[in-house]
Amino acid sequence: MELRVIPYSSNSAYQNMAIDHALLESVAAGNSNMALRLYSWKPSAVSIGRFQSMQKEVNLEQCKSMGIDFVRRITGGGAVYHDSEGEITYSLIAKEGDLPEGIQKCYRFSASMIIDALKSIGINAEYAPINDITVEGRKISGNAQTRRDGAVLLHGTILYGADVKRMFSVLNVSKEKISDKMIKSAEERITDVRSNCHASIDELRDALLNSFTKGRAWKESPLTDEEKERSIELEETVYRNSEWNFNR
Amino acid sequence: MKGYAEKKNPGEKLVCVDISYSDKIEKLMITGDFFIHPESCIMDIEMALEGVPLAMNDMELRDIINNVVESHRAKLVGISANGIVAAIRDATMREI
């Protein structure tokens, strides 16, 4: 099956989550082949996992004062700071039957492609179950997934140039969360591409595209009119809606 | 009374519990960076535990959770019945 590659774009948090959701529905309905998106967030934003508490995980006052959006994902996992210039996000949307069976095998699958991409620009990374990728024990990528009607949405971030101070000024990280990491602070847990090699962010993006498309027929294909319309509807009714964003 | 606890069992994700309780669980919210599919399972676990006497032992609480999980045929990653019960017990010892 030909992989559909959605053209790279920068969008608001609400648009990004709505587009991933619309593509999940499109693939589930059989209206789209397996799809890959590479994208960034403008303005910078915080996304939280499906089961997290917005109030507890995010310093909302700090976000508002810095013009940083905040949104709840449909995928589980943790809170992520998406710097508009400092990371690339991918999403891979496929029928369950086109991916390895089970949640953890899917993480291993996407992790292998990210690890290959990082290797191609000179970084030795490894999969750190359940859903992280690390370089010498420090997190460089976090991943999340959900399933709807027989389709899987896998998405994650690859840190290019992490502004760690800014990141942890908007994320509230509990001591309990890092208790088993053998480190003193959350900041010590993070690394990025820029700290490990000289690749530009465009080279990272190309490396990710090459890795995800390796050995596959693929074609760039923008959102259809139906997908655009559905993403606008989801953006307004779900992702900009405080009932959704503050439902836990 | 109200309580809150965060619990991270080795190899699992963070599980947080907000609880209102008397001699039984009045209201419960489970949050964290775990994964459950289908997602609605977490709300059903919360509902199944509301009204349950805290005098129940851990095994009985785990059975309630596992029954909900089995009825949904849910997949839990980074969270377990053990972890939820441990967080509930911690929350009832940390009054807010």
Image (spheres, coloured by chain):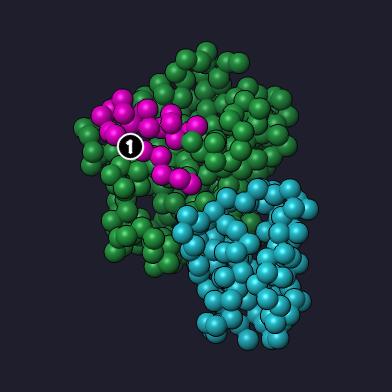
Q: Is residue A13 magenta?
A: no
Q: Chain B is which colour? A: cyan
* Picture mark count: 1
Q: Which residues are magenta?
A: A109-130
Decide if residue A48 is on the left or right side of residue A161: right
Q: Quadrant of residue A3?
A: top right
Q: In the image, residue B85 lies at what x, y percent? A: 61, 69
Residue at image point 28% right, 56% down: A188
Residue at image point 56% right, 70% down: B87
Decide if residue B7 is on the left or right side of residue A171: right
Residue at image point 49% right, 25% down: A7
Q: Is A243 drawn above or below residue A203 in the view shown? A: below
Q: Is residue A120 magenta?
A: yes
Residue hosting label 1: A125
Task: Compare residues A58 and A105 and report the one nearer the observer.
Answer: A105
Q: In the image, residue A43 lies at what x, y percent? A: 42, 47
Residue at image point 30% right, 42% down: A135
